[in-house]
């Protein structure tokens, strides 16, 4: 039976999201010390472990199945040139999908927002070169613009072929179809709607 996602989100991810949301509110009210404390509280080790369990090369949560409808992998000269969405196209995707992963449903945050917060609070929101040196919540909630049919298999850059996902759901599926990893097509269910704004109000 097909599943919704490879691994259900853990409660601590939503705890971290609440800390981050409160941190941004504190920042906007000039309470920077409180913002620092809340950002640090969101850097939860078990959230990192959840992420690592999914996007590692040998993830126990990724099992492969036959998908008769899957398109073949193409030679480079047969692929549509890969192009990530423009800022305007990303805005359209977020207007459609919101700020939740279409696969597992966790809150997501755009890279541009994370960069602004990390630059303002570099000690509370580390973002080093290795996974272990990056803030666990921002890493798990890193918004991705994922091709449903992978570029490697002839997927286009049309917005109908793209969805908002979190980084773990994106990097665990790689170029497989959803059916090949035992998942339902997330476009068959409505996006998650909530008050979560992706921390877009941060200034």
Image (cartoon, grey):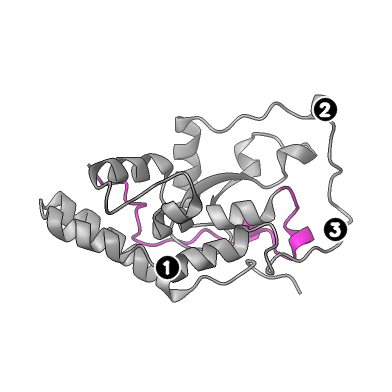
| Pointer 1 or 2: first along the chain | 1
Say left or right for 166 vs 80: left
Disc 1 target residue: 45
Disc 2 target residue: 78
Say left or right for 52 vs 176: left
In whole angstroms, how far apart are the C-alphas of marks 3 and 2?
Answer: 22 Å
Residue 31: x %, y % from top left: 11, 55
Quadrant of the snapshot with the N terminus = bottom right
| Most common SS among magenta residues | loop
As drawn, 137 above or below 97: below
Disc 3 target residue: 67
* Residue at (16% x, 50% y) in the render: 28
Helix, strand or loop under label 3: loop
Q: Depth check: 70 or 96 in front?
A: 70
Q: Is residue 43 visible?
A: yes
Residue 115: within the magenta? no
> Which residue range is magenta in the image?
175-203
Q: Depth check: 102 or 11 in front?
A: 11
In whole angstroms, how far apart are the C-alphas of marks 3 and 1?
Answer: 36 Å
Residue 196: within the magenta? yes
Residue 177: x %, y % from top left: 75, 53
| Pointer 3 or 1: first along the chain | 1
How dense is the environment of label 2, judged by Cα within 10 Å: few (below 14), some, or many (20 and up)? few
| Pointer 3 or 2: first along the chain | 3
* Residue at (75% x, 52% y) in the render: 176
- Which residue sits furthest right? 68
Q: Is residue 99 visible?
A: no
How dense is the environment of label 3, judged by Cα within 10 Å: few (below 14), some, or many (20 and up)? some
On the image, which quarter does residue 75 sit in? top right
> Which of the two discs, 1 and 2, sits closer to the camera?
1
Q: Depth check: 152 or 123 in front?
A: 123
């Amino acid at each position: 039976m097909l599943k919704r996602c490879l691994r259900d989100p853990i409660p601590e991810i939503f705890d971290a999201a609440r800390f981050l949301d409160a941190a941004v509110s504190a920042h906007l009210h000039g309470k920077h010390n409180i913002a620092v404390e809340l950002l640090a509280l969101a850097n939860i080790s078990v959230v990192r472990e959840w992420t690592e369990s999914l996007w590692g090369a040998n993830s126990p949560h990724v099992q492969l199945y036959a998908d008769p409808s899957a398109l073949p992998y193409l030679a480079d000269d047969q692929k549509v040139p890969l192009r990530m969405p423009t800022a305007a196209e990303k805005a359209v995707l977020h207007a459609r999908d919101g700020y939740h992963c279409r696969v597992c449903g966790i809150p997501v945050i755009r890279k541009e927002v994370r960069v602004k917060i990390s630059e303002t609070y570099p000690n509370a929101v580390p973002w080093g070169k290795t996974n272990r040196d990056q803030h666990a919540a921002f890493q798990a909630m890193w918004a991705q613009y994922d091709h449903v049919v992978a570029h490697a298999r002839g997927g286009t850059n049309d917005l109908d072929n793209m969805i908002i996902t979190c980084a773990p759901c994106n990097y665990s599926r790689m170029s497989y179809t959803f059916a090949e990893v035992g998942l339902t097509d997330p476009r068959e269910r409505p996006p998650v709607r909530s008050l979560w704004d992706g921390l877009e109000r941060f200034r």
